[in-house]
Image (tube, rainbow, N blue to C red):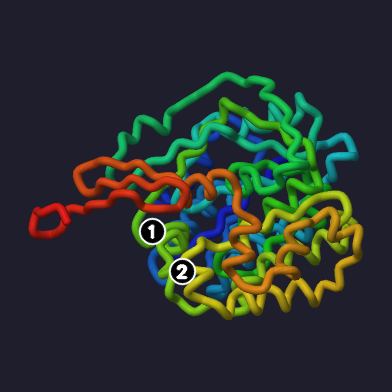
């Protein structure tokens, strides 16, 4: 049995398209758990229509609490109210996720579960994500059907932050007994995905299951990507990372894996413009009271503790791509002409509003 969790918040324009794609799945043995997260538009009434005409759809209403809390509510509902059998018992039960403004191909879950069971692992992720833009797409793309294929296994022990989005996953029920999302407004998917990758280690990947990801104005992901570098940070910025640390500590994973620092390493401009960020980060890492073995497994923590300022921290943890971008740049287009070698700008000219090169 597959349980599909769909968090819903003010998506009246897209919800029917999403739920239709779930209802029409070639994999019929599912229940869809719809979590209305305090929507103020007609999303609730749209969801109610599906619960009335299809007994596989269930609706839970709650006050607006964020997508992480909504997904957790769905997980708890499945574990406490549905007739769940853990995968070790011979009857396979799984949980999958779909965001309410996205669409899945009609063979999406059939492809994923086939790949999961063929590879005898506890989590499968799709590699086939199709990004489309609001108001600029052909609806015929959603009729995409593919045959079942075995896919492949990938060891994520060295790259726990790889493909962390929950909407690309189907996960066995025994893992979902302990996996949860942090109750934060952003970054909850990354924290959840890193914890899941650490528990599973070897993940099945399916190339045939197609997930249609909608890019639209006003979506949470676009708001996060466009954050002002001058905004003031709060301690809530660290909550997702602290959630990962506590999870690793609880399940004795700290000395086995390196926790990715993506969530606590914003871009250079943000670090420089918010000196308090690094000070608070250093205090947080110090409060963990890490053992030497844990520090050896997580060298970035030691770098944070040993660094005197944000700039030093950034350069010590810089990867090759960032190093290259900071030191070399040759760019010639209609708006900019730049030559930068070994960190020094040898030539730069930009096209201004008066249509002149300066």
Q: In the image shown, does 226 or 12 lie closer to the viewer? A: 226
Q: Is residue 63 left or right of residue 85?
A: left
Q: Residue 344 location in percent, x, y?
A: 41, 53
Against 96, residue 189 (above or below) is below
At 54% from the left and 49% from the top, the residue drawn is 323
Residue 313 located left or right of residue 295 = left
Residue with the mark numbered 1: 12
| Among numbered discs 1 and 2, the one appearing first in the sequence | 1
Residue 95 is situated, as x and y percent measured from the top left of the image, at 70, 46
Q: Identify the residue under disc 2.
A: 39
Disc 1 residue crowd, few under 14, some 14–19, many 20+, Cα 10 Å: many
Helix, strand or loop status at disc 2: loop
Q: Position of residue 47 (x, y in %)?
A: 48, 57
* Front in this rendered view, residue 299 or 221: 299
Q: Residue at x 43, y 62 (%)?
A: 43
Depicted 274 relative to depicted 227: above or below:
below
Foreground residue among 91 and 265: 265
**Quadrant housing the N terminus:** top right
- What residue appears at the point 88 percent right and 54 percent down from the top-left corner? 255
């Amino acid at each position: 049995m597959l349980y599909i969790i769909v968090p819903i918040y003010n998506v009246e324009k897209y919800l029917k398209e999403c739920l239709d794609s779930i209802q029409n799945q070639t994999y019929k043995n599912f229940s869809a758990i719809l979590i209305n997260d305090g929507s103020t538009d007609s999303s609730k009434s749209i969801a109610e229509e599906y619960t009335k005409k299809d007994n596989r759809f269930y609706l839970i209403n709650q006050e607006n609490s964020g997508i992480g809390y909504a997904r957790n509510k769905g997980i708890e509902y499945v574990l406490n109210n549905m007739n769940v059998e853990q995968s070790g018992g011979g009857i396979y039960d799984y949980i999958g996720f779909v965001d309410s403004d996205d669409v899945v191909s009609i063979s999406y879950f059939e492809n994923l579960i086939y790949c999961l069971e063929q590879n005898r692992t506890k989590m499968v992720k799709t590699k086939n994500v199709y990004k489309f833009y609001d108001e600029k797409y052909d609806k015929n793309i959603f009729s995409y059907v593919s045959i079942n294929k075995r896919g492949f296994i990938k060891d994520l022990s060295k790259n726990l932050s790889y493909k962390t989005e929950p909407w690309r996953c189907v996960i066995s029920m025994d893992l979902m007994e302990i996996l949860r999302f942090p109750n934060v407004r952003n970054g909850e998917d990354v924290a959840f995905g890193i914890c899941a990758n650490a528990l599973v280690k070897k993940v099945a990947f399916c190339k045939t299951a197609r997930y249609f990801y909608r890019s639209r104005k006003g979506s949470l992901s676009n708001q996060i990507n466009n954050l002002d570098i001058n905004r003031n940070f709060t301690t809530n910025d660290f909550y997702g990372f602290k959630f990962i640390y506590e999870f690793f500590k609880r399940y004795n994973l700290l000395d086995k894996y390196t926790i990715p620092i993506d969530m606590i390493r914003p871009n250079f401009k943000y670090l420089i413009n918010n000196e308090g960020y690094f000070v608070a980060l250093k205090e947080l890492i110090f409060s963990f009271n890490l053992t030497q073995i844990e520090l050896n497994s997580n060298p970035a923590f030691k770098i944070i503790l040993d660094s005197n300022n944000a700039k030093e921290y950034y350069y010590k943890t810089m990867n090759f791509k960032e190093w290259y971008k900071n030191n070399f740049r040759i760019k010639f287009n209609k708006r900019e002409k730049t030559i930068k070698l070994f960190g020094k700008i040898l030539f730069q000219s930009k096209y201004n509003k008066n249509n002149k090169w300066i």
